[in-house]
Image: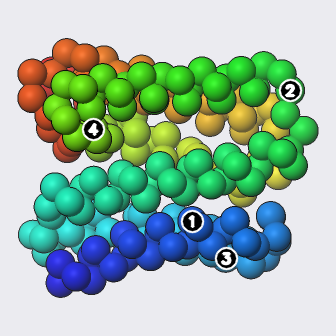
Amino acid sequence: MKKLVMSITISRIFGAVSLLFIYPLSMLFYAVYTLCVASDIIDGPLARKTNTTSNLGALLDSAADFLLAMVVLFILVPILPLETWMLFAIVLVLFLRIVGFSIGFYKYRTFTMLHTYANKVQGLVLALFPLFFGLVGLNIAFTIAFLAAFISAIEELAITIYSKELDRNITWIRRV
């Protein structure tokens, strides 16, 4: 069962990379993207239900999530009519993430992507973004996505700074 869960996570990595070779926002793009999102929804609960969680699995899950987000950013930024403030917002969130990862790596000598509630909300909002902006418009969809990403980046940075030991499965800042 552990191999199945790990395979689901690894499939998200391959799916994310394959998006780089698919025409953006095409039916095939949305199909592969939806499978990537579904794999993210399935792997964590399946690992917990089957008692096959591991530090490696948690790290791979976070890395797969981060890779998918970066690939989608790489694909969408050039083709969406983003305003200047949106580009600054993206850079701000990326900067906060890099600072957090750097502090975590310095402090714990490993990558410190955390599984907080804010990160889960951010993941859901970012997962829905390619589908959502066509329904409510780019400004509203982007603002919601930015706020979710900003809040989760600030929370993860604060947890990384103030935690005495690494707990990737910390759910929110109050436990620090």
Up-down: is 81 above or below 156?
A: below
User: On the image, numbered disc 1 is attached to which residue?
Assistant: 16
Binning the other alpha carbons within 10 Å of mark 1 as few (below 14), some (14 to 19) or many (20 upward) gives many
Q: In the picture provided, is 121 more to the left or to the right than 116? A: right
Q: Alpha-carbon distance for marks 2 and 3?
A: 28 Å
**In which quadrant is the C terminus drawn?**
top left
Binning the other alpha carbons within 10 Å of mark 3 as few (below 14), some (14 to 19) or many (20 upward) gives few
User: On the image, numbered disc 3 is attached to which residue?
Assistant: 31
Which mark is drawn over residue 112? Answer: 4
Which mark is drawn over residue 97? Answer: none
User: On the image, numbered disc 2 is attached to which residue?
Assistant: 83
Report if residue 38 is visible in the image. Answer: no
Which of the pair 104/40 is nearer the observer?
Answer: 104
Q: Residue at x 51, y 54 (%)?
A: 67
Report if residue 62 is visible in the image. Answer: yes
Label 3: which secondary element: helix
Q: In the picture provided, is 11 more to the left or to the right than 56? A: right
Q: Residue at x 45, y 29 (%)?
A: 98
* Dot in front, 1 or 3: 1
Binning the other alpha carbons within 10 Å of mark 2 as few (below 14), some (14 to 19) or many (20 upward) gives few
Q: Earlier in the sequence, mark 2 or mark 3?
A: 3
Q: In the picture provided, is 121 more to the left or to the right than 24? A: left
Disc 2 marks a residue whose amino acid type is Glu
